[in-house]
Image: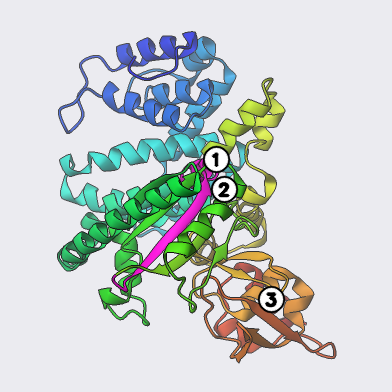
């Protein structure tokens, strides 16, 4: 049973699934059961509960193994049956094609399933990850469709669920199939730079370890290489303009410690060895966590050779939650809640409401937005777009889609703040209201209490559904 937990129900599901797929082969030539096992092993690695692992082993037996949901329910219980049914339903949804109505309706269905029990989507993400690893064995037209769907739906979903490592892996696996020329260009461009950066990081690691030993700080130091797809997107930014010399985090250092106090002690050691870069500064996401719960200290320093090094400092628990997102929250929730009720599971006790508010918002949008096209825009350009994090003057952190403006920020804070916006300052300087914001900026909204309603012209540049909806509401009056 490899590294699966020794649980009687998991053992039973293992045998049941293996028998269901006897004689069946994948395009790769491997037994079909090898896929089910790979999914279950990943869920075990994420330390999800036994019910999820059982559902992972059984997730394809209805579609490909000739079994019925009723058989699953009778042998493994209703919870497992519900999860397998949910994954099967999502598996039937096609997100690519010319029919926009069908595409949007399928997204709606997925979100309804997701809002009921998030474990369904975690199993589906594990399923997609293994399928992406074996994508090369499929026909070219299937490769493109599945990879494109992965970039547009599943990688952003992993990001929104806080599973950062999986998001990066999914993007890198899809990249060569969707953008083959661009992929080859980035590989060729970055090869020498990665080697130099990794050599620098390797030396920096040794310097840090020596200093930590002197200071009696127990810490692990790891090097981290930037994901290729993320690097490509960064190279396309106007301020970078494809100049790889302007990218400072090709390789970076990550320091892992036991306690929060050790994070700050480690920061002191880092700045003792290397001077921080004033223009970038320190970003303390421990004192001010990101809206998705991400916690870490980021600092950027001048290395010995003058090259800039990015360093992240966090506890082991913070690292687990940063890499595995809601899956880690599920694990820690289990540890604190030994008796799990169905109600707690349905409410998603393992992931606080704040972390899943966007899921509930998407479901509520289904009732508010009549047209499929408008709903699709809301999904693609708000919910599933790459995110930025900006600060209010009080230090609160707000999660917004890329290209969000001060007006989008104002409506994210409060409806009345958006309605009465007269101007904005970003990092202390006045900016245009249509100026796209960047991660790490501090945004201050200047209000005019006498202003009756927002300007209809704002609709030409706002990107969030919340801002559009509020501005349109006033436009009709």
Q: Secondary structure at mark 2?
A: helix
| Residue 256 higher or lower than 88, as above or below | below
Say which quadrant the C terminus sits in: bottom right
Q: Secondary structure at mark 3?
A: helix
Depth check: 376 or 304 in front? 304
In which image quadrant can residue 350 be found?
Answer: top right
- The residue that disc 3 covers is 410
Closer mark to the observer between disc 3 and disc 2: 2
Q: How is the image coloured?
A: rainbow
Image coordinates of residue 335 in percent, x first then y, are: 62, 26
In which image quadrant can residue 463 be found?
Answer: bottom right
| Residue 268 higher or lower than 301, as above or below | above
Would you call the spot at circle 2 few (<14 residues within 10 Å), some (14-19), or many (20 or more)? some
Image coordinates of residue 88 in percent, x first then y, are: 44, 32
Q: Secondary structure at mark 1?
A: loop
**Magenta run includes residue 340:** no
Residue at the image point whose x is 27% and y is 24% from the top: 34
Q: Disc 3 and disc 2: Cα gap in Å?
A: 36 Å
Drawn side of residue 289 relative to residue 46, left or right: right
Which of the marked residues, 3 or 2, is nearer the chain's N terminus?
2
Which of the marked residues, 1 or 3, is nearer the chain's N terminus?
1
Say which quadrant the N terminus sits in: top left
- The residue that disc 2 covers is 262
Q: Are marks 2 and 1 in contact (CB under 8 Å)?
A: yes
| Residue 17 higher or lower than 211, as above or below | above
Which numbered tag is attached to residue 258? 1
């Amino acid at each position: 049973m490899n590294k699966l937990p020794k649980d009687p129900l998991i053992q039973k599901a293992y045998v049941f699934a293996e028998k269901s797929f006897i004689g069946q082969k994948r395009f790769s030539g491997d037994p079909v059961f090898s896929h089910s096992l790979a999914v279950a092993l990943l869920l075990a690695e994420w330390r999800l509960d036994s019910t999820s692992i059982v559902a992972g082993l059984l997730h394809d037996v209805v579609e490909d193994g000739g079994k019925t949901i009723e058989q699953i329910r009778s042998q493994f219980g209703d919870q497992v049956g519900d999860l397998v049914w949910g994954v099967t339903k999502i598996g039937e949804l096609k997100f690519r094609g010319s029919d926009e109505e069908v595409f949007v309706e399928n997204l709606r269905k997925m979100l309804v399933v997701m809002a009921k029990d998030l474990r369904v989507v975690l199993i589906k993400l594990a399923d997609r990850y293994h399928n992406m690893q074996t994508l090369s064995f499929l026909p070219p037209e299937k490769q493109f469709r599945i990879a494109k769907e992965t970039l547009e739906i599943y990688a952003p979903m992993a990001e929104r669920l806080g599973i950062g490592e999986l998001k990066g892996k999914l993007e890198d696996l899809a990249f060569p199939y969707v953008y083959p020329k661009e992929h080859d260009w980035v590989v060729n461009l970055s090869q020498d730079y990665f080697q130099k950066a990794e050599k620098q990081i390797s030396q920096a690691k040794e310097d840090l370890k020596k200093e930590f030993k002197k200071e009696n700080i127990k810490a692990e130091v790891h090097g981290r290489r930037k994901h290729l797809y993320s690097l490509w997107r960064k190279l396309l930014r106007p301020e970078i303009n494809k100049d790889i010399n302007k990218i400072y985090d090709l390789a970076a250092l990550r320091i892992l410690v036991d306690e929060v106090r050790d994070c700050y002690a480690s920061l002191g050691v880092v700045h003792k060895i290397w001077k921080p870069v004033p223009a970038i500064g320190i970003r303390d996401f421990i004192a001010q966590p990101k809206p998705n719960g991400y916690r870490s200290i980021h600092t950027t320093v001048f290395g010995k050779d003058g090259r800039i090094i990015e360093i992240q400092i966090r506890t082991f628990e913070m690292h687990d939650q940063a890499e595995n997102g809601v899956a880690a929250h599920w694990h820690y929730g289990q540890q604190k809640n030994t008796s799990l009720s169905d109600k707690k599971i349905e409410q998603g006790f393992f992931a606080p409401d704040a972390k899943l508010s966007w899921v509930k918002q998407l479901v509520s949008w289904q009732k508010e937005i009549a047209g499929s096209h408008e709903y699709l825009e809301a999904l693609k350009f708000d919910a599933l777009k790459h995110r930025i994090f900006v600060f209010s003057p009080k230090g609160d952190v707000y999660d917004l889609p890329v290209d969000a403006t001060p007006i989008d920020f104002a409506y994210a804070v409060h409806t009345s703040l958006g309605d009465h916006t007269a101007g904005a300052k970003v990092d202390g300087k006045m900016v245009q209201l249509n100026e796209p914001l960047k991660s790490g900026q501090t945004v201050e909204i200047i209000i005019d209490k006498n202003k009756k309603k927002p300007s209809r012209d704002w609709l030409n540049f706002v990107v969030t559904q919340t801002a559009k909806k509020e501005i349109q509401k006033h436009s009709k009056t």
